Image (tube, rainbow, N blue to C red):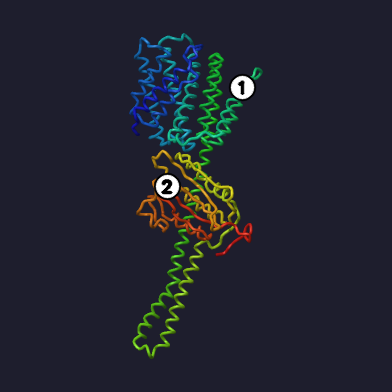
Amino acid sequence: MRAISWKVLLAYTLGCLVLDAVSHPQTVLPLALTSWTPPPGLSLAFLLLYGLRYIPWLVLITFLIGLPINGLASDWFTALAAATILTLCHGALAVWLKQGLGIDPHFRSLRDLSWFLVAAVIAAWIGSGVHVFSEYLHGSPESASWLADLVNYWVSDLIRLLVVAPLVLVHANDHWRAWRPTREMFVQAAAIAIALWVIFGLKYTDQFKFFYLLFLPLIWISMRHDIHGATAALAGTHLGLNGILEWLELHAITVVEFQMLMLGLSLTGLFLGMTVTARRAAEERLHQREADLNQALRLAAAGEMAQALAHELNQPLSALANYAQASRMMLADLERNGPLLADTLNKIADESTRAGQVIHRLREFFRGGMMHMETCSVAELVEESVAPLRKRAERYGIALNIDLPGNLPAISIDRVQIATVLLNLVGNAIDALRNNTAAERTIDIEAEYTAADTVRICVGDSGPGIAPEIRERLFQPFATSKPEGMGLGLAISRTLVEAHGGTLDLLGNQPTRFCFTLPREQPSDERTRHRHV
């Protein structure tokens, strides 16, 4: 549980009061039934994010919110008790969800959403029960339909919990400074507005039969923007729907019927968005495991190379030692042993050459062995390589900027190996920025065609830079500043780049900038070939 500033508390208070004031209660039913009352959803989200220490504050706000609707009751203690019961129940549910079930309040899995839905159903029943029976205790409605009133208010309360609380929880950690609306978002908002216009604006349409049209933009947005887009789309749809219902001044019974439809829409949108989120998280974990497997294979190859070096170099090194010792003894009688000494020195040279050939052969094996070469454009390579990391960057509010000129030549590479290099460099940049508190959190990917007939690709970030104690051995195996890192990524990346005839270097530290070069496609290159190194 974390402390928050008075500004957050003030914003919460004003938000509850303003949002509640602009929602007009439907008074046709015996109860003051509202189609849009955000405070219960805000309260549950607030308690999940910040803990129970703010319950007294939330009780006071809940009590004050009831005054514009019911007025200052003569029995103010009953209203205060109702507010206390509601807030304590929300607090108990928050504790049950976080500590009892261990869910992530930001909804990282279908399990988190499912258990939140159970809690929302319980909270809605408690809220409707407190509201209905407190009204009956005052003798306001003289009706035998208390059960229908209870169900109607439960639907209203459940919708505001399902729309408001997930919206706040999912977007609580978003970095709004880095957020920029796209053209697609405007088109999607227009699609929701058009669906509402078709449902309520056309003269000869049945409003209830055409309500299904709202599912179409919701499905589109959820598939494109996962749970983040689904919660925003539901909030926009609910606001638009309630505005139309107030403008048309429909009977409260009709409002309840639309709320039933909105409940189905909310459940569909939340679970569809969460399913897309879970699928993308699984894909990201799969890509990460593939990268980890690639590093593990390279590490195994490094171990095999070390063993092979020890085995293959043992004989030439032993021979070199013996020949050197014999040469030292021959120097005692140089005149008689001159020819033999010359022959021994020739053998030393031969064994040195042999040792160099062993190292060269094993080094070439470690540098790739067999590479599947193919021709591709730089833009295609960068886009395919960066795609698995885009969602991870968005989660931390990091902007990925790609600047590729149009005059870049095609390159002949092993696409999988060079994609591994880009994944490693961009992944390191994300790790450097995710805990950075700077206002600007960007990763820049650039490319240029150099005078040396090569393509240079650079990955830069606005992070804190490389620590001085590790900068000198940055590309050495097991050199890392990350507690969970193995320190092999950059070493392997440089090996892969060098196997293609290029170089990988650190060309800037603040901002950090890694650049590697690749030779352009030669006219004699085949479209696809296997190369043995």
Outermost residue, right side: 204
> Dot 1 lies on which element?
helix
Query: Residue 409: percent from the left, percent from the top?
Result: 59, 53
Query: Residue 300: percent from the left, percent from the top?
Result: 46, 60
Kindly identify which residue carries mark 1: 199
The dot on residue 469 is: none
User: Image height check: is 333 above or below 489?
Assistant: below
The residue under label 2 is which amino acid type?
Pro
Which residue corresponds to the image point at 50% horizontal and 16% vertical from the top-left? Answer: 148
On-image quarter of the C terminus: bottom right
Kindly identify which residue carries mark 2: 511
The residue carrying pointer 2 sits among few (fewer than 14), some (14 to 19) or many (20 or more) residues within 10 Å by Cα, namely some
Q: How many marks?
A: 2
Which residue corresponds to the image point at 36% horizontal and 27% vertical from the top-left? Answer: 7
Q: Image check: 406 left or right of 165? A: right
Query: Residue 124: percent from the left, percent from the top?
Result: 45, 23
Mark 1 vs mark 2, CA separation in Å:
53 Å
